[in-house]
Image (tube, grey):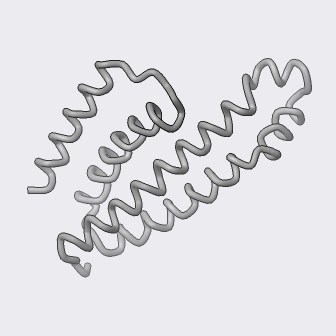
Amino acid sequence: MRHLGIVATWLIIFLLVGLNSAGDMLTARAMRRVGDFAELRRKAGILGVARAVLTEPWFYLGLLAMGLSFFSLLAALSLIDLSVVIPASASLTFLLNLLGAKFFLKEHVSRRRWISGMLVLGGIVLLRT
């Protein structure tokens, strides 16, 4: 396996994390716009649910970001050790999703979640060394 320098390694991981989090946040926004599946299914049936999802533009943006994230993961795994890529990307994705939930989706993020995010950040620092 070809090993990259530290800057290139972290740039690839940050690209992966950004695309992964974008996919999560865009898909979440789409599903909020679609609404409650159970209620929608009662009113319009399963085809109504599918129609609501498939006519939501945010869904396609999320799907695109998730697809690009998948190929970024493949590229990262071809260049960087699994023992670095997965823990770093998972923990950084958690942190970015936490920020996205608060500022992009306007969710209430509890103090406990912020504290857990800081602990995850500490783990990333340990991983880096």
Quadrant of the rendered image containing residue 110: top left
Residue 19, horizontal then vertical, whole percent: 48, 57
Q: Position of residue 32 (x, y in %)?
A: 66, 30
Q: Above or below — where is 97 with respect to 17?
A: above
**Residue 124 versus residue 87: which sits nearer the camera?**
124
Q: Where residue 116 appears, x then y in whole percent?
A: 26, 28
- Position of the C terminus, as image quadrant, is bottom left
User: Which residue is rendered at x = 41% and y = 72% of the image?
Assistant: 75
Instruction: Single out the residue that lies furthest toward the left.
Output: 129
Residue appearing at x 40%, y 63% in the figure:
15
Q: In this view, does 41 lie to the left or right of 92?
A: right
Residue 79 falls in image quadrant: bottom left
Classify the position of the N terminus by image quarter: bottom left
Q: Which residue lies furthest to the bottom in this view?
A: 2
Q: Which image quadrant for residue 17?
A: bottom left
- Could you tell me which residue is drawn at 71 percent across and 33 percent down? 33
Compared across the picture, whether 26 is left or right of 96 comes to right
Q: In this view, does 3 lie to the left or right of 66?
A: left
| Number of numbered markers | 0
Q: Where is residue 105 in the image (x, y as percent from the top left)?
A: 54, 33
Q: Which residue is depicted at the point 70% across and 53% down?
A: 60
Report the side of 47 relative to 61 (left or right): right
